[in-house]
Image (spheres, rainbow, N blue to C red):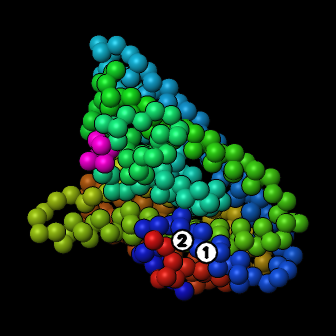
């Protein structure tokens, strides 16, 4: 089975579907995990996912402070307050992209990719939400996902540019506060999962291994297709010439977003490579490092405003996807569980 484009529209939902299908397919008593699997999961969750979730929570909390300073401040200080809030949004978005490049654990369980990073942005929906003037967690729960999260805050801070003491600014505060609440929940979830006794929690370890590799594959394809190649092709085939509709374009953060997501994929290659080495797959581990290095180079020269620079990145990410799917997953005893029937 291969990862479908329908899955990319609902990657978190696909992750949940994957876990359900794997749970049904797994043996009644999962095998004792290999030491290499235990070490790989310990490193991935303890050294990568949990610290990144904590960093995202910290940045989201700082964003609340920056938005509050803007919205509660004097009109004469609005320009400075807006600039500070925009800078903090960039830091928060980067921390988010670094965490969710490989979307696992609490991100999947809470469908956070959809809840906090809904694309494309829908300005009319946000404007209606501003008019409804929600206040507090309960009222924000009744606001639709397209009017909340990181893309909505991007639109508010760069397009709406809310002035202090206005309904738009008060709504921006509510969106930032909800983001911080959810970030805290994700951080607590990752911290708890990082404490898992992978050596003895056989069922949890089996599921976590399957999820990790599948979501790594899914994240690579999400970056390659949904983030880069699809918008590029849509612009090339449009009847009127226009710039590709890349995510984070409004804030000029597209390239930084790609880099943060790639950092998540690149760093996961370290524990995966060590696990392959421990299983006697030294040649495959070296092959993985070579593909990662070539993708590093391709993404380092990729520029959202220079479409001609993007083909090498698309090709390199495609090569990594194929390697994970065809060679790394089987070597780690992982079944690729996505299909055309999965997702939204």
Q: Position of residue 96 (x, y in %)?
A: 52, 48
The CA span between labels 2 and 1 is 6 Å
Identify which residue is drawn at 68% across, 78% down: 22
Viewer-proximal residue among 130 and 80:
130
Place residue 233 in its image quadrant: bottom left
Q: Does 175 appear in magenta?
A: no
Viewer-proximal residue among 48 and 104:
104
Residue 14, numbered circle: 2
Identify which residue is drawn at 53% across, 55% down: 112
Identify which residue is drawn at 43% across, 52% down: 145
Q: Point out the image quarter for the C terminus.
A: bottom left
* Label 1 residue SS: helix
Q: Which residue is mark 1?
A: 18
Place residue 316 in its image quadrant: bottom left
Place residue 108 in its image quadrant: bottom right
Q: Position of residue 236 (x, y in %)?
A: 20, 69
Viewer-proximal residue among 23 and 334:
23
As drawn, 40 above or below 31: above
First to last magenta residue range = 123-128
Mark 1 Cα-neighbour bin, 10 Å: few <14, some 14–19, many ≥20? many
Q: Position of residue 58 (x, y in %)?
A: 59, 35
For the question of whether residue 42 can be seen, the reply is yes
> Relative to residue 323, is residue 188 drawn left or right?
right
> Relative to residue 209, is residue 86 drawn left or right?
left
Identify which residue is drawn at 76% across, 73% down: 206
Q: Main secondary structure of the magenta part?
A: helix
């Amino acid at each position: 089975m291969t990862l479908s484009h329908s899955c990319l529209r609902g990657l978190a939902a696909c992750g949940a579907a994957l876990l359900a299908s794997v749970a049904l397919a797994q043996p009644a008593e999962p095998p004792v995990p290999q030491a290499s699997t235990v070490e790989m999961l310990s490193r991935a969750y303890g050294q990568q996912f949990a610290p990144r979730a904590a960093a995202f929570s910290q940045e989201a909390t700082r964003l609340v402070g920056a938005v509050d300073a803007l919205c509660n401040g004097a009109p004469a200080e609005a320009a400075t307050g807006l600039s500070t809030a925009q800078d903090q949004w960039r830091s928060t978005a980067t921390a988010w992209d670094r965490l969710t490049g490989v979307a696992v654990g609490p991100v999947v369980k809470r469908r956070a990719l959809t809840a906090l990073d809904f694309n494309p942005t829908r300005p009319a929906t946000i404007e209606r939400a501003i008019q409804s003037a929600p206040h507090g967690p309960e009222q924000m729960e009744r606001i639709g996902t397209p009017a909340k999260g990181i893309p909505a805050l991007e639109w508010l801070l760069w397009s709406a540019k809310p002035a202090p003491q206005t309904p738009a600014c008060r709504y921006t505060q509510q969106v930032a506060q909800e983001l911080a609440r959810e970030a805290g929940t994700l951080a607590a979830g990752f911290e708890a999962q990082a404490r898992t006794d992978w050596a003895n929690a056989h069922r949890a370890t089996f599921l976590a291994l399957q999820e990790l590799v599948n979501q790594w594959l899914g994240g690579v394809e999400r970056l390659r297709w949904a983030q880069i190649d699809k918008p590029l092709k849509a612009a090339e085939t449009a009847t009127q010439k226009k710039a590709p509709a890349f995510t984070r374009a409004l804030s000029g953060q597209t390239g930084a977003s790609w880099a943060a997501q790639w950092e998540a994929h690149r760093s996961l290659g370290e524990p995966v490579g060590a696990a392959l080495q421990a299983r006697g797959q030294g040649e495959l581990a070296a092959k993985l490092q070579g593909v990662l290095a070539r993708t590093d180079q391709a993404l380092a020269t990729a520029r959202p405003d220079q479409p001609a620079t993007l083909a090498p990145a698309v090709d390199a990410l495609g090569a990594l996807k194929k390697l994970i799917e065809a060679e790394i997953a089987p070597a780690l005893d992982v079944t690729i569980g996505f299909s055309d029937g999965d997702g939204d």
